[in-house]
Amino acid sequence: MNTPKKMIRVANAQGFWGDSLLGPKRLVEEGPVDYLTFDYLSEITMSIMQKQRMRDPESGYARDFIKMLKIIMPQCKDKGIKLIANAAGVNAPACLAATKQALSEIGLEGIRIGIVEGDDILDKLDVLTNAGEELVNMDTGAALASVKNDIISANVYIGAASIVEALQQGADIVITGRASDPSLAVAPLVYEFGWSFEDFDKIASATVLGHIIECGPQCTGGNYTDWRDVQDFAHIGFPVVEAYEDGSFVVTKHDGTGGLINVESVTSQLLYELGDPARYLSPDCIADFTSIHMAQDGPNRVKVHGVKGLPPTDSFKVSMSFSKGYKILTTLCISGPDAIEKAHIVSDMVFTRMKMLGADIPEHDRFLELFGSNVLYKGIVESPDQPHEILMRLGAKGMDADKLNVMSSEIAPVLTSGPPGITGFAAGRSRASEVVGYWPALINKDKIETTVKVEEV
């Protein structure tokens, strides 16, 4: 049985899939850490991983995690650092196999790997809907029947309990699929401090902790409004939290790293993806963000305490993706004078020629964006009448990839048959790619059963 500790250090090494590979390496090398969490998944990431698995059945997980293991695991083993990652994405078996292979290649033995499954309910959709689970779209209220035949993935946002179970079985590395982001940090606190999941104030505090660090350096000065106060962005520190058994914690970073941690930078992250501040919903609890107390606890240290919590709801969130046809997008640079007028001529020219070739694209499926003409600040600041140059992004969507690909053959010809001053075709012809739609829903918790398996390699 684990002996309760007074304080543990939890650091988030990846804020998203594609985050800097330096994060985990520096966290391990530059200071003390007990747990490294890796938050790879977002709704769009799940869709991308699903597209990858459609092309390659052995793909669909965070391959960066496997590269990272080879770099940091020898030191993690020596220092007793445990890893918790939602790296499995939409393909837990493949991620587990790749993890074993990576450890084998660097000659590490005696590592226990825990795999948490049960979040993938794709094969159970018929059973679940027949049992009364409606899985309506949370955003639109649309019935699942409208897309059910096109569903390609369905994953439940599971909580921390299964991760705790893996740690109790001695796992050094815990890999999950679509666990909720804060739950990755809730689990080690529950395990180390022996908390009950019915101690809702402490679970809520851990959830707030997880929410603060889930985006990596976004709480240590990254993407911060007062960015001129932030020192050394190149060496910005990834977040480290000193968590205490009473539920309080201190947000900090390793000494000597760049970035900035103050009440304002941490507050900025707290507001990220926040709906009702009094009812932040997670699989583990409802956290009341209005109860949070924060205070500066020294340079680059912010203490958080007093968080209140309530029992979780009876439902899990489900992230589903479905086939939504295809899209094509191409870019050209257009110089002035009259760059905007030229761009519209080019757009009309391309779509007209596509129609002449039997690939008519309806107006509502066309896309034209002119960067340099206030695309990002449209309606907020005055647009320049005559920009010297613009970047034209021309695209279309539809269910027929071959029809969309006609666009790719009609872009280059505008260089010789369209207005003057057009360049930027060096990237070559674009191709139509699949579009994966997002379908958020809720499902009763009693319909979901997770499994935990721990293997030693």
Image (cartoon, helix red, strand yellow):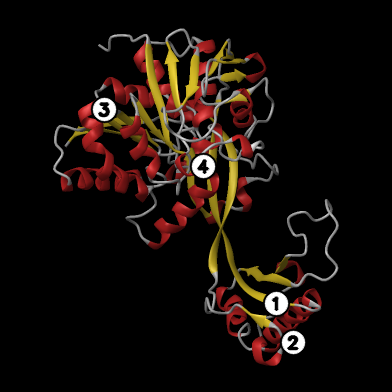
Q: Earlier in the sequence, mark 2 or mark 4?
A: 4
**Frontmost residue, 55 versus 20:** 20
Residue farthest bottom in this picture? 417
Residue shown at 14%/36% (left/top)? Answer: 109
Task: Provide the residue designation for mark 2.
Answer: 419
Q: Amino acid at mark 4?
A: Phe
Residue 114 image position (x, y, % from top left): 28, 32
Q: Quadrant of the N terminus?
A: top left
Mark 3–mark 2 Cα distance, whole angstroms, equals 64 Å
Instruction: Answer whether labels 3 and 2 touch (C-beta < 8 Å).
Output: no
Q: Earlier in the sequence, mark 1 or mark 3?
A: 3
Task: Provide the residue designation for mark 1.
Answer: 334
Task: Provide the residue designation for mark 3.
Answer: 171
- The local secondary structure at tag 4 comes to helix
- The local secondary structure at tag 3 comes to loop
Q: Crowdedness of circle 1 by 10 Å Cα count: few (<14), some, many (20+)?
A: many
Residue shown at 77%/54% (left/top)? Answer: 377
Q: Earlier in the sequence, mark 2 or mark 1?
A: 1
Residue shown at 43%/29% (left/top)? Answer: 184
